[in-house]
Image (cartoon, rainbow, N blue to C red):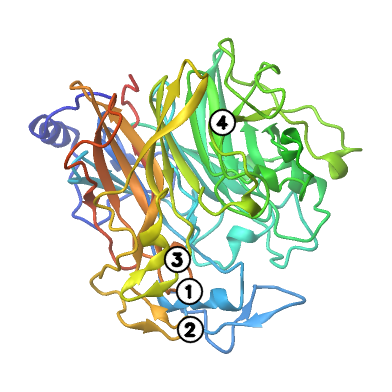
Amino acid sequence: MRARTGIAMLAAALCAAGVVATAAGGASATSAGPAPATAHERLFPGELLVSGSDYVTDPNLVAGQTVLPPGCVTGCATAVANGTYPQVFNNDTVDGSFGVTAPIFLDQITPSGHLISRFDVPPSQVVTSFSSKSELALNLSPNGRYVSFMGYATAPGLLDVSNSNTPGVVDPTNPVPGAYYRAVAQLTRTGHILRTETNAYSGNNGRAAIVADVHGHELIYTAGNAGNGASPQPNGVILGAGAQLITPSHQPESEQTPGTPTPVGSFNITQLGDKPDKIGKDDNFRGLTLYRDVLYYDKGSGGNGVDTVYFLDTTGKACPNGVGLPAPDAQLPTSGLSYDLATLQQTGLPSNMCILKGFPTALAKNTTNSFPFGIWFADASTMYVADEGSGVNTYANGSYTAAAASSTAGLQKWVFDSVAGSWKLAYTLQAGLGLGAPYTVPGYPTGLNPMSGLPWAPATDGLRNITGRVNEDGTVTIWAVTSTVSGSGDQGADPNELVSVTDQIDGTSPAAGELFQPVRVPVSGRVLRGVSFTPGTDRG
């Protein structure tokens, strides 16, 4: 992505299109249909989209009365907080699956942060789970036609949907008995939303999706996690985890009939010579990007597998021992993995994914310093990886100590060493993030949360989803959504922000004075999740 149109040209285009930009926090009119009439020509190439959600108070959630999870049969609890933000997320203390579905917004902003317009995604199309920090990544398709993201095909105000089953993959041991399809949303430049439902990610959530044109056919590649029940997990949960392949649907919701999930990739720690752990949980992916016909994923949470960066190998020769580099002749997959249901419970899916050479290979249970999230390639030998931090909220002397002490959280710059044939960490950008330093947000509680005994005030812990642009002067600018630590009931519900930094692409260390700058500041009751350039932007 290079130069964008100037503000004056943009304003003229807005007037010509009959679009009025909403004020910060405002909403533009949309219909419940797939093509909002007022949204035509409202997205402009070269601008940014930021995804997020504003919490809506749930009056039906009553402390001391509401049973959690909804519809539970055994192991039930009673709500300890009403539906008012942020106290509502203290219900996490009695219900580990707690969450509240909420509407999604997409803010169109200039790269410097000026709000152009807001697109409120019709709740009839797709919603998110408020507090699910790994949701709503935004990905621009290679041809620039779509920006895609994932959510749920249901309504706002429902509890625990992010850990529910999907209708076609029901796990009877899941403590959350509800069933809701996950959904991929494709946003076009004219504001149309195409929605495709799936039975993947039963028991958990879809995190990211990207659409690619492969030999004249559009395909959706997704990343996420599955399973919220006991072992052994049903076959459908194993099949619906990790890396999925979905064919876009152009049918209305009432005519869509999602079938068995189609896994397209899988990794197993036995490839590294380690003993197997819980089947399917090595594929707890969240970050996703596509670069030069290769799909890259990362894993940064959970006690199974390896928290690191992966790629999907379609050649079958890139990583005989679980670690390697993409083959020059690699192509995007056009079909799912072949698997044997008779051995699925014992050995899982066939392994066709590799740890990118140079990235960590230690098991997640044995390390505490690798939490990758967003991935962005500046070029074939320079990539940036966001590390969200550990989430540990130890607090002393006015600081969240674990976050403040981290040397790996923030934006990691990796460069390819052609002599060694391996990626190497060049440095990690942290200046300006204020890791571990509590910040105040107007309207957000101060003092201590009595449920945790720690401050309500959040602090930046690292970074999650990112995107970037190569500038003509040899620099790159990266935009990133921050992660947080706090004493709140669920750190995923903390108000966070969008920041940016400009880095010298061939630099071997950070330039003097290089630091992150705020682009969108925290707002009480609001979470920011993904960032991407708008549909129509040339990926360059």
Per the model, the C-alpha gap separating discs 2 and 1 is 8 Å
Chain-order first, disc 2 or disc 4: 4
Mark 2 touches mark 1? (CB < 8 Å): yes
Q: Which quadrant is the N terminus positioned in?
A: top left
The reply, left or right, for residue 508 in relation to residue 85 is: left
Per the model, the C-alpha gap separating discs 2 and 3 is 13 Å
Residue 489, labelled with which disc?
1
Single out the mark in the foreground, 1 or 4. 1
Chain-order first, disc 2 or disc 3: 2
Q: Secondary structure at mark 4?
A: strand
Residue 491, labelled with which disc?
3
Q: Secondary structure at mark 2?
A: loop
Q: Residue type at mark 1?
A: Gly
Q: Secondary structure at mark 1?
A: loop
Name the one closer to the observer, 416 or 228. Answer: 416
- Residue at image mark 2: 451
Per the model, the C-alpha gap separating discs 1 and 3 is 7 Å
Q: Which quadrant is the C terminus positioned in?
A: top left
Residue 48, how many percent across, how many down? 28, 38
| Image point (44%, 71%), residue name | 394
- Residue at image mark 4: 220
Residue 332 against residue 263 in the figure, above or below: above
Residue 472, how many percent across, how many down? 20, 20
The answer to whether one can see residue 317 in this image is yes
The reply, left or right, for residue 283 in relation to residue 503 is: right
Per the model, the C-alpha gap separating discs 2 and 4 is 42 Å
Q: Residue type at mark 3?
A: Gln
Q: Badge 2: few (under 14), some or many (20 or more) residues near its Cα, within 10 Å?
A: some
Chain-order first, disc 1 or disc 4: 4
Tag count in the figure? 4
